[in-house]
Image: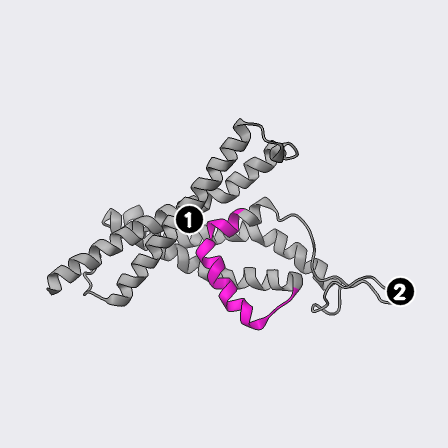
Amino acid sequence: MLRRLGLRRILPIVQFALYGMLVGPDSIYLYEVLAENTNPTWEIVALQEGVPFRPTHIDRRIPTGVAFSTTLNFPAVVFGAVVVIPFRPKGTKAELAHRLATAPFVVFQWYVVGLWIDRRLGFVSAKPRAFSKPRLVLWWALYFVSIILLGVLGLGAGGLLIAVFYNLPTLSDVRPAEIGSALVTLLPLAWWAVFFYLVSRSGLRRVSAAALEKT
């Protein structure tokens, strides 16, 4: 069953449904709040006498589910931002537009992940490719991104452990639930760092093999 369907078909459906479950309810809430106004382009200004207060940005703590979905779909979030930025939406409207633009990239992102895993499991045969300098640059760039992510996460985790062990004052006002929520939110970044590392190393090996065959 798994071999016939392949993770390249299963993961996009499951992850898109999960994205909707994590982001959908909060997005509906934000949309309903904005719908109470007649102009979604208002900016926050100092309250003055005779000037109605018309905010478009809701200053609040990001829900854990939304934050987790953001890191879980890190590459898709980046591409979604690239699509939205040229239109320059403002305030909470920009947040909603970004979430909508990210949705199709979530499907594509997990298709690529599933396809790579299917090839590793032998569900799909990997086609040999000729040596390509752009592909070599891509794999090296992805490799360095993975190393940077692993380094940042390692330093962050190490610093947190030291702070907890020595009971530093910086954590005195932080509740354990907030620390746990932050760790759960950042955990997907560790997955992406490891995934980028494995993909880039595999790609570099294939490029090297193709270069040797070329010579």
Colouring of the image: one colour
Q: Residue furthest right?
A: 49
Q: Position of residue 165 (x, y in %)?
A: 52, 27
207 displayed left or right of 164: left
For the question of whether residue 186 can be seen, the reply is: yes
Q: Under tag 1, what secondary structure?
A: helix
Residue denoted by label 1: 149
For the question of whether residue 8 can be seen, the reply is: no
For the C terminus, give its image quadrant: bottom left
Residue denoted by label 2: 49
163 displayed left or right of 206: right
Region in magenta: 68-90
Q: Position of residue 173 (x, y in %)?
A: 66, 34
Q: Position of residue 87 (x, y in %)?
A: 57, 72
Q: How many marks?
A: 2
Question: What amino acid is at disc 2?
Answer: Glu
Query: In this rendering, is residue 157 above or below 132?
Result: above
How many angstroms separate mark 2 from mark 1 (CA)?
49 Å
Find out whether residue 117 is within the magenta segment.
no
Q: Are marks 2 and 1 in contact (CB under 8 Å)?
A: no
Question: What amino acid is at disc 1?
Answer: Leu
Q: Position of residue 160 (x, y in %)?
A: 52, 35
Residue 188, located in which quarter of the rendered image? top left
